Amino acid sequence: MDALMLDGNAVAGLLQEVFAVEMTTAIATCSACDAAGAIGATQVFRGAGVVLSCPHCGNVLATIVEADTRMWMGLGGIRTLQMAMDLGSGPSGGRHRSA
Ligand SMILES: [Zn+2]
C-alpha cells in the first residue's frame, strides 16, 4: 500500500456532505471487474482531489475535487451504487413508501 493511500472510511465526512445518507456502507459495483463492495473498503488516494479506486482491480471508481464553494464529483467507474434509505427519521418522520 502506498503511504498516501487510505481506505474509503477516511473520506466519510466528505461523502456525507455530498450524499445525505451514510456512504461508507453503500455498495458500489465496479464497472471494470464487476466486484461489489462497501465504499469504506475502497482505496483512497489524496492529492489535488480525492480518488476512490477498486481494491480488486485498481479501476478509478470516483473522483472528488473541492474548491471554495463548489465540488466536482465523477462516478464513471461505478456501475451501480446501492444505498440504505433511512425511512424512519427526519423532521417529517422520514420518507414513506406507498405499498
Ligand atoms: Zn474493479
Image: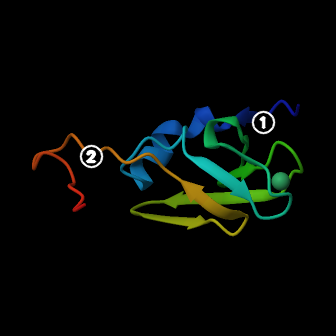
Which residue is located at x 87 percent, y 51 percent? 58
Q: Which residue lies furthest to the front in this view?
A: 99
Q: What element carries label 2?
A: loop
Vertical placement of residue 95 versus 40, above or below: below
Q: Are marks 1 and 2 in contact (CB under 8 Å)?
A: no
Secondary structure of the residue carrying tag 1 is strand
The residue closer to the viewer here, 68 or 78, is 78
| In the foreground, 9 or 89 | 89
Mark 1–mark 2 distance (CA, rounded to whole Å): 34 Å
Asked whether, in this view, residue 99 is left or right of residue 35, the answer is left
With 12 as the anchor, is 35 left or right in this view?
Answer: right
Quick one: label 2, few (<14), some, or many (20+) residues within 10 Å?
A: few
Ligand 1 closer than 8 Å to the CB at disc 1?
no
The residue where tag 2 is placed is: 87
Label 1 CA crowd tier, 10 Å (few <14, some 14–19, many 20+): some
Q: In which quarter of the image is residue 77?
A: bottom right
Residue drawn at point x = 25 percent, y = 60 percent: 99
Query: At x 64% / y 38%, what residue is drawn?
Result: 8
Tally of numbered tags:
2
Viewer-nearest of labels 1 and 2? Answer: 2
Q: In the picture provided, is 9 more to the left or to the right than 51?
A: left
Q: Where does residue 7 sit, x and y in percent of width and height?
A: 70, 34
Residue 89, position as x, y percentages in the image: 20, 40
Reading the image, the residue beneath label 1 is 5
Of the residues shown, which amino acid type is indicated by label 2? Leu
At x 66%, y 59%, the residue is: 63
Q: Position of residue 9 (x, y in %)?
A: 60, 33
